[in-house]
Image (cartoon, helix red, strand yellow):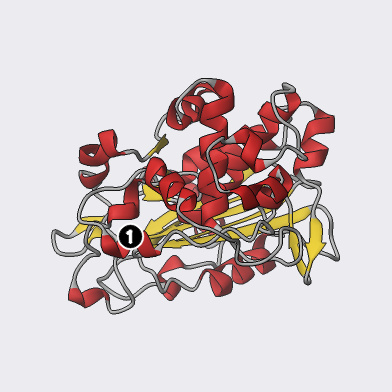
């Protein structure tokens, strides 16, 4: 009798055990760092798995609750904070950078908020200061760097050039116009509202918390050991947000249900502009042939992140890896073929 019951149970479970062909192990090195992936269809989780090690040396495995530095996938979160301030009437897309952050060089009078959002500002890249510092840097250091510049790399609006500097200044604008530190604003008005309990903005005061994260990041040649701390780990706006796949699922659920802003404002958020064949909305890369689909990648000192979003069908993919060479293009394409 017991044997027959077990047989019935196994017959029920076997089809589900073989339901998905996607194998994360196909995309990560054996016995090395790995990735966590979450795939949702119509807002419902279809696939959520982890593979590889969070810490190769200590043999700590990645799990579906592991925390990763989102790198540039953070940008569309910063942009959402900006959208909320636009909705509140505190700033506009045409606001001048020199008015938003007084004390910047004269050329910033020609840079408007929308130039920062869509990477057409012409602001010089700040990242050289990372190599010159022996201490953890903050957003204030980026602002000081811009104050010392005398001219833009190109005239605002004349071309697209991906700008981390622009998004750091967007974070500074959030702080200046909301009266709250950027990390506090993000926690109060975005992360808490979405129910993201394992997400935070990295800041110098959170240095110890960040360094204690069990997820260590690795270069292409991962056997050489984990990436060392970088002075620019604590600069935010362009990156600098730590999260999990589960929290990112909560984020996209909130993003596609107008939880952060009205439907009309969300339409603005998802409206792309095309400059030099680059299609970009509020912190997300758009698609010239499909106005409802977006994606964005991120890379920072061994972390490789990637998200795709279909707002019409509420489909999304979230790929977070601690190996800089993780082939998220191949893995996300395979997932799209299987699930969508």
Does the rendering let one see residue 42?
A: no
- On the image, the x and y values in percent for residue 54 come to 27, 57
Q: Residue at x 72, y 21 (%)?
A: 88
- On the image, the x and y values in percent for residue 63 come to 34, 50
Q: To which residue does mark 1 refer?
A: 130
Q: Of 175 and 69, which appears nearest the observer?
A: 175
Q: Of 21 and 160, which appears nearest the observer?
A: 160
Q: How many marks?
A: 1
Q: Height in image: 191 above or below 120?
A: above
Q: Of 112 and 78, which appears nearest the observer?
A: 112
Q: Height in image: 305 above or below 222?
A: above
| Quadrant for the N terminus in the image | top left
Q: Residue at x 73, y 51 (%)?
A: 281
Picture quarter containing residue 130? bottom left
- Judged left or right of residue 317, residue 289 is right
Q: Height in image: 274 above or below 172?
A: below
Picture quarter containing residue 197? top left
Q: Residue at x 67, y 64 (%)?
A: 336
- On the image, the x and y values in percent for residue 149 come to 49, 57
Q: Of 57 and 201, which appears nearest the observer?
A: 201
Does the rendering let one see residue 94?
A: yes
């Amino acid at each position: 009798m017991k044997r027959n019951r077990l047989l019935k149970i196994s017959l029920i479970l076997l089809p589900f055990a073989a339901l998905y062909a996607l194998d994360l192990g196909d995309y990560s090195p054996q016995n090395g760092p790995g990735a966590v992936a979450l795939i949702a269809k119509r807002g419902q989780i279809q696939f959520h798995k982890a593979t590889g090690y969070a810490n190769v040396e200590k043999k700590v495995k990645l799990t579906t609750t592991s925390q990763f530095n989102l790198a540039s996938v953070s940008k569309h979160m910063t942009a959402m904070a900006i959208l909320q301030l636009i909705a509140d009437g505190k700033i506009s897309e045409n606001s001048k950078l020199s008015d938003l952050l007084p004390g910047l060089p004269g050329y910033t009078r020609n840079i408007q908020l929308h130039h920062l959002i869509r990477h057409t500002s012409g602001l010089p890249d700040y990242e050289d200061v990372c190599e010159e510092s022996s201490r953890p840097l903050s957003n204030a250091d980026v602002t000081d760097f811009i104050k010392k510049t005398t001219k833009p790399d190109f005239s605002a609006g004349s071309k697209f050039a991906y700008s981390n500097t622009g998004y750091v200044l967007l974070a500074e604008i959030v702080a200046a116009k909301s009266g709250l530190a950027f990390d506090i604003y993000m926690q109060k008005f975005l992360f808490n509202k979405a129910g993201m309990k394992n997400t935070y903005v990295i800041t110098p005061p959170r240095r110890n918390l960040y360094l204690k994260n069990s997820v260590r990041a690795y270069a292409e040649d991962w056997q050489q050991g984990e990436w060392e701390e970088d002075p620019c780990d604590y600069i935010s706006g362009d990156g600098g947000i730590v999260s999990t796949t589960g929290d990112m699922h909560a984020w996209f659920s909130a993003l596609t249900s107008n939880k952060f802003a009205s439907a009309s404002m969300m339409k603005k958020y998802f409206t792309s502009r095309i400059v030099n064949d680059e299609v970009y909305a509020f912190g997300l890369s758009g698609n010239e042939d499909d106005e409802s689909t977006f994606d964005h990648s991120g890379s920072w000192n061994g972390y490789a992140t990637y998200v795709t979003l279909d707002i019409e069908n509420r489909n999304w993919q979230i790929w977070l890896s601690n190996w800089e060479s993780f082939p998220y293009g191949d893995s996300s394409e395979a997932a799209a073929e299987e699930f969508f």
